[in-house]
Image: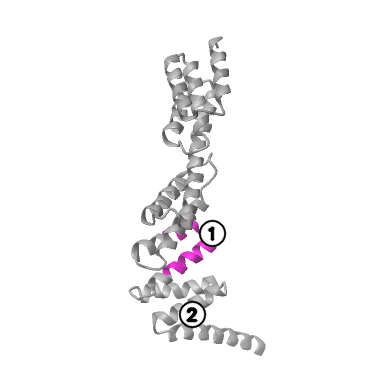
Amino acid sequence: MLKKIFIVSIILLTTSCKTTNKLELTNAEDTFKEGLMLFNKKNYTEALSFFDMIKLQYPGSNIADKALYYTAEINFIRQEYILASFNYNRVRTNFPGSEYAKISAYKAGLSLFNISPSYHKDQEHTIKAIKTLQEFQYVYPDKEDSLYKKTDSMIIKCRSKLAEKDFRIAELYKKLESPRSALIYYESVLKSYDDTEFYEEAFVGKIEMLYWMKRNDEAINTELTYNVVFPAGRLLKNIEDIKTKYSLGK
């Protein structure tokens, strides 16, 4: 019995010490230092409580931006990417003059990029990632900047997913022998994703669908456009094969 009382007393004493430490922090700077120390020790749950204290008790302090940034960092480390993006965006919008504004703008987009799914799934996060990354480029337009180059790479990857989604739908309709529906999605790729690897293939798909539907004049004009865009196109033979196929009838 005495042993149990001793253990309980130790626990209460430890808890009391922790509480006392927090209560003894009477300014934002000391509170942030304590939180940062815990963050560096990877004690993220406890660190977050100190950063939250700054947001609640010292929202107008000169380190409020730091507390919010490290809150976002904890979200990011925990792979809570939607929450991380939200908090990084708060740093960017609430503290535009902060030293953390630029990196926060970048990581707001990176967070969404990290949850962008494969092309066959819903692309809501992919679209939001593109928008957020493009906002970074608008605010920080230096194309030689390393972060700008990283956002460029992520935007291209996201746009390629969207292009592939439409292209694969077009291919599916082609297999289902629905050329009219396939044409809609090939044209979507041609209209919106000329910077992706699916652009040239969409040209060929469109030409084939037009020949399939006996819209030969449109097919010929599309082929002429293809020749201008891709004078040494890798799919020229595919187009010739399509023309041969449909000249023989389907």
Picture disc at residue 34: 2
User: Mark 1 highlights which residue?
Assistant: 79
Query: Label 1 sits on what residue type?
Result: Gln
Question: In terms of depth relative to the viewer, which is nearer, 102 or 178?
Answer: 102
Q: Is residue 9 left or right of residue 186?
A: right
Query: Label 2 sits on what residue type?
Result: Glu
Density class for disc 2 (Cα within 10 Å; few <14, some 14-19, many ≥20) is some
Q: Is residue 1 left or right of residue 131?
A: right
The C terminus is located in which quarter? top right
Say what secondary structure mark 2 lies in: helix
- Could you tell me which residue is drawn at 47 percent across and 57 percent down? 147
The percent coordinates of residue 144 (x first, y second) are 45, 55
Q: Disc 2 and disc 1: Cα gap in Å?
A: 23 Å
Tags 2 and 1 touching, CB below 8 Å: no
The percent coordinates of residue 205 (x first, y second) are 51, 25
> Does 44 sit above or below residue 154?
below
